[in-house]
Image (tube, helix red, strand yellow):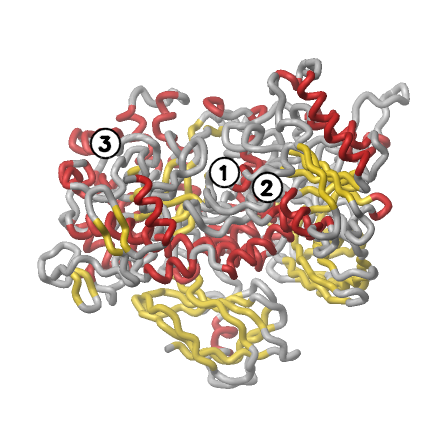
Amino acid sequence: MKKLIAMTLLLGGSTLLCAQKTVKIPAVYKPVKNEMYKKGWIDFNKNGVKDVYEDPNATLDARIEDLLSQMTLEEKTCQMVTLYGYKRVLKDDLPTPEWKQMLWKDGIGAIDEHLNGFQQWGLPPSDNPYVWPASRHAWALNEVQRFFIEETRLGIPVDFTNEGIRGVESYRATNFPTQLGLGHTWNRELIRQIGLITGREARMLGYTNVYAPILDVGRDQRWGRYEEVYGESPYLVAELGIEMVRGMQHNHQVAATGKHFVAYSNNKGAREGMARVDPQMSPREVEMIHVYPFKRVIKEAGLLGVMSSYNDYDGVPIQGSYYWLTTRLRGEMGFRGYVVSDSDAVEYLYTKHSTAKDMKEAVRQSVEAGLNVRCTFRSPDSYVLPLRELVKEGGLSEEVINDRVRDILRVKFLVGLFDAPYQTDLAGADKEVEKAENEAFALQASRESLVLLKNENNVLPLDIHNVKKIAVCGPNANEKGYALTHYGPLAVEVTTVLEGIRQKSEGKAEVLYTKGCDLVDANWPESELIDYPMTDSEQAEINKAVENAHQADVAVVVLGGGQRTCGENKSRSSLDLPGRQLKLLQAVQATGKPVVLVLINGRPLSINWADKFVPAILETWYPGSKGGTAVADVLFGDYNPGGKLTVTFPKSVGQIPFNFPCKPSSQIDGGKNPGPDGNMSRVNGALYPFGYGLSYTTFEYSDIEISPKVMTANQKATVRCKVTNTGKRAGDEVVQLYIRDMLSSVTTYEKNLAGFERVHLQPGETKEITFTLDHKHLELLDKHMEWVVEPGDFSVMVGASSEDIRLNGMLTVEDPNAPVQTQTQTDSPVTASTNPESVMNVLDKKMNTVWEGNKGDYITFALKNGSKVDGVSIAFSRSNGLPAEFEIQLSGGGGQFLTVYSGTVSEYGKLISYTFKGTTASDLRIVLNDDRVGVAEVKLE
């Protein structure tokens, strides 16, 4: 029977064969005819009356309160738990009669990873009829959804959650580089588009919530999950996180859940497993490094989900901390979505942290702290039943339960589960998921993520017309596994580096391949401590690689890491190349032939020998399924690498912690710091610093201009400079803006990243780059742990890396009596409440009165309470007449805005109507995504 099913899937037939029945997959999904589905609304509680929560025209809060008032304790508690799908806890692919006897007969909050094809070991099964194609997958999730809508009393839809940090985790979907690689693009627009694609494909597959992006900041290169962060700069993590969330949550297609809150990514000694505790950092570092991205992404992108981490901080487990989950997250940051636990986080309160005596006490602590949904690979009964007992025994107030359920329902309403609970366009799913345009974009993302670390004597790019034989070796040369790991698409076609080189060389050069060595040796990781003798088979394999190199004109050695050396629970005690990889590289280099080292890995490596002796080094991270093509494009000059490091490469693990930003003199160059006897006792300085990356062309920086040069803490300053491509090839340059507080009441970082722009330049072309500085770039945590901008001088630096500063200037902040505090700056710069004059300038029906701003600025209009908005007319102005990008955002209150429209304006001086899905809102915001754009008139519709 399995063979018959597989054949039907392969042929793409419209009829799905199952063991029990034959199911025809329609182009458009319609639930079995049922009188509960009315025109324009759904009778979820089947009472024949349009209740407030069933009314799409009712306000969000009214719908939530109406539904909550009808829920029993059993129904409320079922909303507070995840049911793990796809054979983990939920063993059934589709509903069965037994479901009516299970706990979830009263509903369920979320079903996680259902039918996504993930297996802990090996590729996903190809004989499950529901994992692929996309239309069948979406149909199956619809059928599961139909059970909860039609067979439970109140019909509350389930939130289908899934992973998605490099594309939605499914049997098939668009596969992007790992998040660390995406960080190295420094490209906001690219990250937003990846978010759009990920969110769109997730929704077409039937998912409504994606556990991404990861907002942790990488601070210890040994950490196993380093591959999953954008980088080590909190500013960069925040900027890219904002774009990812805006893309994913565009038009409320899905909820994005950022993780892991908070202080998760700097465990003691980078240890993981059951030792994910005791992060080593001061309160000030926690705020400035680890809290910062979450705070900005919540406030500026309207993040709808947060995953609570399972570590403690200062002796208090995060998942049981009212201070972190309620006071800070909801009170200070204005978070209005729901908090889901990382797997087993609640259980860890008593199994690891020992702050709870049993599961019931762990449940009480987590719920009172602010946890909305428990997620783990365990039966939901283990959480829900103790939760009910606590309420009935008086150990937990039902009002606390109500507060937690409100947040869950709010997210479900926002993503449209009560208005459009089914993914009806099944044929569209097959067209959208992994479509050609998305695949082409994934290739571009792979290209932009590559970083050229060394190119001595211009070994690269290779001239295919002069190279007749190419030797390729290394454990990652023909490896695909790095693109098929957890948290992304699982069974896509992968182009390896070897395949990419062969495709480029076909008919032009001969490719000689041998593996050379395995990723690790038989004694690894102990072999990092003891130099075991090479075995005969290991030596023989290296000899083959050497023989090929002797015959070739150039050798490409592909080394690095993989699933064995990096990933969740895969922290290391060394940053050296594992196994026999260095011996392979040394043997090939000894042939005297030009050597190109290609690294495929998930963390910075201490490649000191390679940096000294190998002429060309290309860092690719885990470059996604298109990685082999992207690497070959760079090797042969069809693409000019422009990625820059978002991490620091230490020379030795003995230097850790070693990252950007750092305090003055904490990482001073060893050559300037000899001991008392004039001799050095340690190696200092980075192997490659933050922001570093080479190109096949050269760039010149000029004409820095700061305006105004003197400002108050409440004002903004503009920094402009020019960048010129002085080489002979077109290429990308990542222009980086850094600032330094010259005198402060507390010690501050030597440099802070305050802006960046990736710009493409043709040979000889010059472009002007504009940055805006405001309080968020200048503020510090003072002695009282309050965010303020202190008066004084700030050094302004523009450069090609954190250590390659090309331009310098000075900005002075005046008015010592009015420091800016972040808590008082949570409103928009221009609102009806804080600056009515500016708002009235665009509501006075006069085109000559204009509010003008730069990229990132916005103007906000207060609406009448409960207003339903489905469109707005805007007249823009711009002196240069060039097209400008903008967004329209709405807020239901609490300072959280969601993008409902993104577009480009090219016609100025006239009102143009922009429509979007109608929703109730308290505030409307227009956000500028280009500089020097004015809003002349606004007409609310």
Label ID, residue 874: none
Between discs 2 and 3, the one toward the N terminus: 3
Percent across and percent down for residue 869 are: 35, 71
Q: What residue appears at the point 59 percent right and 65 percent down from the top-left corner?
A: 855
Q: Are marks 2 and 1 in contact (CB under 8 Å)?
A: yes
| Alpha carbons under labels 2 and 3: distance apart | 39 Å
Between discs 2 and 1, the one toward the N terminus: 1
Percent across and percent down for residue 914 are: 43, 75
Element type at marker 2? loop
Amino acid type of disc 3? Asp
Residue beneath disc 1? 485
Indicate the quadrant containing the C terminus: top left, top right, bottom left or bottom right.
bottom left
Q: Are marks 2 and 3 in contact (CB under 8 Å)?
A: no
Amino acid type of disc 2? Tyr
| Alpha carbons under labels 2 and 1: distance apart | 10 Å
Looking at the image, how many numbered discs can be counted on the residues?
3
